[in-house]
Image (cartoon, grey):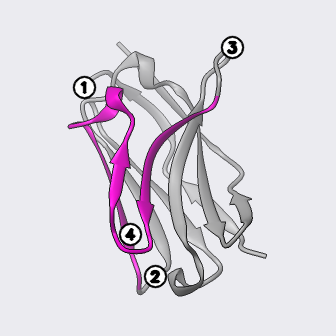
């Protein structure tokens, strides 16, 4: 019963930055992995970035070098720092957590990038 609350989405011009936050109700000690997904209209949901319990990170090719996933263990909060944003990044972004065999999702936050 992990609850995830996302924030930080909004409208930004191309080249700008946003930082998404995801606050988890459970300690990271109980969470095996966390990540950020996104889904644009008419497109499949895709994994943007993930971080394991051991701190290993992984990124979708299109965001490598621009996005950074991180966490604050004391606050049980996951972050996605998004720099050099492009219109193609426009989507609803979802926080995801996996605890053993169970999956948990946030409500989603809209990110819109305009030129």
Q: Which residue is mark 1?
A: 15
Residue at 52%, 66% (x, y): give it.
Answer: 33
Task: Where is residue 21? Give x, y as percent.
Answer: 48, 59
Q: Earlier in the sequence, mark 4 or mark 3?
A: 3
Instruction: Nearest to the eye among marks 1 and 4: give it.
Output: 4
Quadrant location of residue 22? bottom right
- Residue linked to disc 2: 75
Q: Is residue 106 left or right of residue 65?
A: right
As drawn, the residue found furthest toward the front would be 101
The disc label shown at residue 71, or none: 4
Instruction: Tell me what residue is drawn at x 72 percent, y 60 percent.
Output: 103
- State yes or no: residue 59 in magenta: yes
Q: Which tag, 3 or 1, sits closer to the chain's start? A: 1
| Residue name at image x 61 percent, y 56 percent | 96
Of the numbered discs 2 and 3, the one sitting upstream in the chain is 3
> The residue tagged with tag 2: helix, strand or loop?
loop
Which contiguous range is marked in magenta? 45-73
Look at the numbered disc 3 and give the secondary structure of its residue: loop
């Amino acid at each position: 019963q992990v609850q995830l609350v996302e924030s930080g989405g909004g409208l930004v011009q191309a080249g700008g930055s946003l930082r998404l936050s995801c606050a988890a109700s459970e300690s990271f000690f109980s969470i095996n992995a966390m990540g950020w997904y996104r889904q644009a209209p008419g497109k499949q949901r895709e994994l943007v970035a993930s971080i394991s319990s051991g701190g290993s990170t992984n990124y979708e090719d299109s965001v490598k070098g621009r996005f950074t996933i991180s966490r604050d263990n004391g606050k049980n909060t996951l972050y996605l720092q998004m720099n050099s944003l492009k219109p193609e990044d426009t989507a609803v972004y979802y926080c995801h957590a996996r605890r053993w065999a169970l999956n948990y999702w946030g409500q989603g936050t809209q990110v819109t990038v305009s030129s």
